[in-house]
Amino acid sequence: MIALVDHGIDVAQVEASVRDASCGAVLVFVGTTRDTFEGRPVLRLEYEAYVALAQAELMAIAAEIGARWPGARAALVHRLGVVPVTEASVVIAVGTPHRADAYDASRYAIEALKARVPIWKKEVYDDGHAWKPNAAIHEDPTGS
């Protein structure tokens, strides 16, 4: 399951999409909107994306996970539009034969998403707003 959605994310559905009899571990990461950033109250987030390229990058990340961790299954869903405080902006689920790989693959997925997927976030405060692109991470998510 790879998707960009303009509504709430069904976490259970994302998790179910990676369940398989060969997977001894299923791990779900849910990134939510928090109510503060650097001491400023956050009212909501608003996301925009270059949809065609974002979809392609999400699919590439899932394929990389499958290649790097044999038997791994990955689902990546990111929300677009307005995301209120406490609601999910991103849900990543991975299913792997063993738990250590599930943790590694999940970390890889979120770091690669943040580094490569063209999604922009507007943080809306009670006294203004700020646009924030996904920023390149300092460490190569491929481990190269």
Image (cartoon, grey):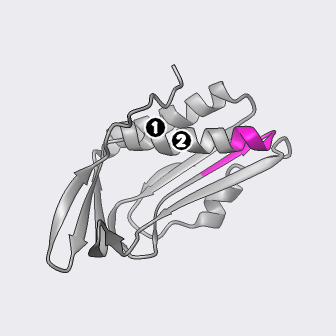
Q: Position of residue 91 (x, y in %)?
A: 53, 57
Dividing the picture into quadrants, the one containing residue 98 is: top right
Q: Where is residue 80 in the image (x, y as percent from the top left)?
A: 35, 60
**Residue 58 in the image: above or below residue 64:** below
Q: What stretch is highlighted in magenta?
A: 93-102
Toward the viewer: 85 or 78? 85
Q: What element carries label 1?
A: helix
**Residue 143 in the image: above or below residue 138:** above
Q: Where is residue 120 in the image (x, y as percent from the top left)?
A: 27, 52
Q: Determine if residue 19 is in view.
A: no
Mark 2, other Cα within 10 Å: few <14 / some 14–19 / many ≥20: many
Identity, as a three-letter code, of the amino acid under mark 1: Ala
Mark 1, other Cα within 10 Å: few <14 / some 14–19 / many ≥20: many
Q: Where is residue 51 in the image (x, y as percent from the top left)?
A: 32, 46
Residue at x-position 73% and y-position 28%: 70
**Labels 2 & 1 near each other (Cβ < 8 A):** yes
Identity, as a three-letter code, of the amino acid under mark 2: Ala
Farthest residue, direction front? 39
Task: Name the residue tied to disc 2.
Answer: 109
Mark pair 2, 1: CA separation: 5 Å
Farthest residue, direction top? 144
Is 7 left, or right, of 44 in this rendering? Answer: right
Question: Residue 11: which disc?
Answer: none
Task: Name the residue tied to disc 1.
Answer: 112
